[in-house]
Amino acid sequence: MPYLDQTDQSLVELCLHGDEGAAREIVHRFERPVFSLIYRMVRDRELAEDLSQEAFVRTLNNLRRYDPAYKFSSWLFKIAYNLTIDHLRKKDLEVVSIQGAPDAVTGDRQAATAITLPSSDERPDELLEARALGSEIETAIDRLRPDYRTAILLRHVEGHSYEEIATIMDVPLGTVKTYIHRARNELKEALAHLKEP
Amino acid sequence: MKDHLTPDELERLSAEDPPAAGARRAHLDSCARCRRALADWQALDRELARLGHLEAPPSLAAAVMERCRAELVEWRALDERLAEIGHLAPAPGFVAGVMARVRLPLPWPERARALVRRRWRAMAAATASLTAVTGGAFYWLLGSRGVTPAGLVPFLLDGARDLAVQGALGAGRLAYRLGWVDPAGGLAEGLGLLDAVGGLVAAGTLGLLSIWTMLRLMRPAPGLARAARTGAWGERLRAR
């Protein structure tokens, strides 16, 4: 069965008939987008992998509840987003910046709360990932409020429409527009120092 | 004098040239204070009407355009940086980890096959035991009646024929005792060909509906197809 050529909806149909290959293709197709969103939300690789896996398991084990009127990826991202937000709220975790917690005013405190970037003897892909996460734009995104950050990532990284983002985040369309507008303004200000002279 | 004109009334009167007749006009004729106030309003109006446009600095338009261009450059730079953000990859084995915990709904024939594949030893042992017990019981029963293995098939056929005949006779006797025979005969005589065919179609439809309902009820529930093989990541998440 050439799963690569199947649409998301067709894969869901196949899954509903017990096709394990189709389920595997769904996970393979969305593992990076879902993991990226969650990782950028929690900034903890292990936790992000756990939450991503949980999101996929919940999605695939509840396929009968999926309403085909909506885009499958929106449903999947909605589950992933809710799971992440719930987890952050439940555990009352602080979303830690790679440069230290926002309330870290001393150097020691910043060092204690900062995410350690890997050294050069680590895997090349991890090194690339660390460089990516340490870039100016990632740092600026990291400083956004979680809902602004989710909206901007869904819009600019995943390419979702405003309506889809509203569905995923379960907020009105106008709120999504406000989130993205404010997030873009904050990002522009944060990156203003990089402006060419 | 009471009831001087309010600022709003003065403003309206100043717009009228000459002021229209009426109660306010009559008050104005008899009140020097309100006349002075109206004259002040009209003087202000005349001064405001003389205000014209001032020349904008020659560089204003260029400065505005420059700022717009700079803004545009900034927004474009932001869009370019946002477009550079890529996806991050989970650890190798992520898909396998998910699939180990996924339980897809399976159609019942596949569920049965999967059950046989998983439990074939236990099922074979149960079948062998059942066969041995049943065979032993049959052998003992038939042996006590003097039936040899060679005469088993004719004996079973005779038994089946007797059973069918006795069943039919019993059903007939029962129907006769319950008084169903005569009314049913009368009903059959009163039925036309179309009625009979219609009745058969209705009965057939009802039967098919029953089968369909049974099949719907026997559809597998999600969560039966796979057993978790590793589940390590889920355990880790629950332990957090």
Image: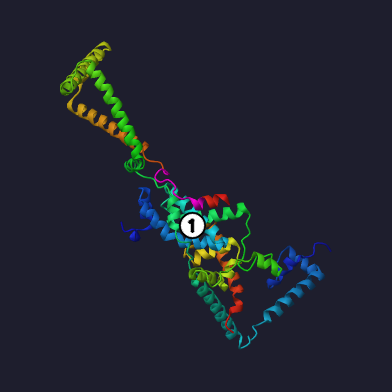
Where is residue A3 shown, x and y percent of the image? 34, 58
Q: Which residue is mark 1?
A: A77
Colour scheme used in the picture? Answer: rainbow
Where is residue A56 shown, x and y percent of the image? 46, 54
> Magenta region: which residues?
B222-234
Q: Is residue A195 magenta?
A: no
- Residue drawn 54% across the image and 52% down it: B237
Q: Is residue B6 above or below residue B177?
A: below
Is B151 in front, or is A72? B151
Image quarter hosting the C terminus of chain A: bottom right
Image quarter hosting the N terminus of chain A: bottom left
Q: Is residue B223 magenta?
A: yes
Q: Tell whether B135 sits left or right of B77.
A: left
Packing grade of label 1 (10 A; few <14, some 14-19, many >=20) is many
Q: Amino acid at mark 1?
A: Phe
- Residue drawn 59% across the image and 66% down it: A142
Q: Which residue, as the protein is rendered here, is positioned at the far right?
A: B1
